[in-house]
Amino acid sequence: MSSRSIRIGLCGFGVVGQGVFDHLNKKRKALGALLGADMSVTRIAVREKGKKRDVAVDEGIITSDPISIATDPEIDIVCELMGGTNTAREVTVAALKAGKIVVTANKALLCDHGKELLSIAQQYGGHVLFEASVAGGIPVIKAIREGLVINDFSSIYGILNGTCNYILTRMANEGLSYQEILVEAKELGYAEADESLDVDGIDAAHKAVVLAYLAHGKWVDFKNVRLQGIKEVSQEDILFAKDNGYAVKLIAVVNRERGGKALHVSVLPTLVERRSSLGSVDGVFNAVSIHGDVVGETVYIGPGAGRHATASAVISDIVDAAKLLIFGGPEGRFPFLDSAPKNGGGIDIARPDEIHSRYYVRLVVMDQPGVMAEIASILASHKVSLASVTQKEVPEKAERASLIITTHLTTEEAILRAVADLEGLTILEEKPFCMPIGTIS
Ligand code: HSE
């Protein structure tokens, strides 16, 4: 083993923290040989001391005070793996002010405070590395920052939440409801402690904001991300998808509109062609399709959640951090380590009338004469043109019928207005469900 020691402090010791600890220990010798330095976890902060854990740890290195790790002069690299945005921010700020390198998997923290944290890092000569924050084990942040550095990105499409993709896949394969599958996703360590972050699309939106920053240099305000989760996706939607060569996926979009001057960031259930690059990505896997002006389309697929996938990404950052400590400043190897390569100044948020798509609309209506005419007239009044209308034969004396409409290309503004008008109809028995039909290649 080499003479130099790199000391790591883990703040947070849940699913991911324990995975990082375990894999770092198992590969300690190999990493030592690679870096010419010994890397070890010397302190761990936990929420609850004395709790039963999956990995054996010397209790002497455990504390319940993460700030004491962030400010410990003996610690070189602080891994923030606690989740949440309050204590996580305090720990990150304290570590950066102490000039340390912070590795985090916390997408919510980056989305809410990324601008501030990267600026503090620059001011104090530290760094914030966050490969594990987006798409679990896929090294997509390195891909955008390093491998694709010459590109301008017209569009990025992503399946960014492993829990939702796992749920949607099993809904399609086994006909189960999302609640039944969510319990298993939690047991497997995919879901967030607060699972509404997953199923309401919030986690994927945090990740989309991080991707938008990396690709375009702009921190998009979370409230500017149009967002819908998967709770309202029904078996009917999934069956329609199957019958028509699609799959329902929760898709994050980071697109340039208005000739590149505006940015559209959204996370929505979306019908995607099953044979497209994202349409066949199932289970806990994530996928990101990136269109660069120089390279064309590149697609990245891999496990998006869980102990091992996330630990793999966190450890890649720990190794980068160790290289910075051993070999010096970022200038040589990481041209854009603490900032995005693109200058986001002057990019607006795209308006709904600038966002174009085809749409799927499911309506549950009263089964009576004139219903179709009323619906068609509302869509026509918003210049939304029908591409197909499907109604399964309804038994005599049934009171409700389910209608599925697909539209030709229209704007987000037109479809949202049309759906709002449809919601006002007395013939409607349930809130309409609407999702885009993606044009992912
Ligand atoms: N809950 C997240 C997911 C974990 O399911 O994708 C990885 O960020």
Image (tube, rainbow, N blue to C red):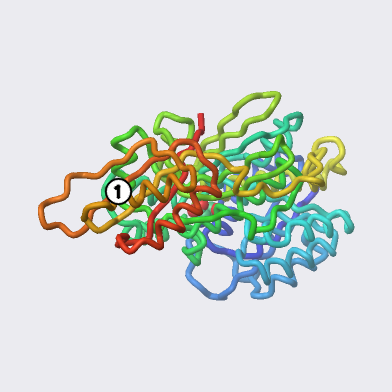
Residue 354 visible from this viewpoint: yes
- For residue 7, side relative to residue 296 (left or right): right
Judge by depth and name the residue closer to the eye, 357 or 325.
357
Q: Is mark 1 within 8 Å of ligand 1?
A: no
Q: Residue 91 at what x, y percent from top left? A: 73, 67
Q: Residue at x 55, y 52 (%)?
A: 204
Q: Name the secondary structure under disc 1.
A: helix
Q: Position of residue 53 (x, y in %)?
A: 49, 65
Which residue extends farthest left? Answer: 396
* Residue position for label 1: 372
427 or 339: which is nearer to us? Answer: 427
Residue 96 in the image: state x and y as whole percent.
81, 61
What residue do we see at 75% from left, 72% from top? 68
In the image, is 73 to the left or to the right of 138? right
- Whether residue 308 is visible: no
Amino acid type, callout 1: Met
> In this picture, is 26 found above or below 82?
above
Where residue 328 sits, quadrant-wise, is top right
Residue drawn at x 48%, y 64% is 196
Q: Please tell me whether residue 244 is drawn above or below residue 40 in the rendered image.
A: above
Q: In the rendered image, which quarter contains the N terminus?
A: top right
Q: Is 247 positioned to the left or the right of 129 in the image?
A: left
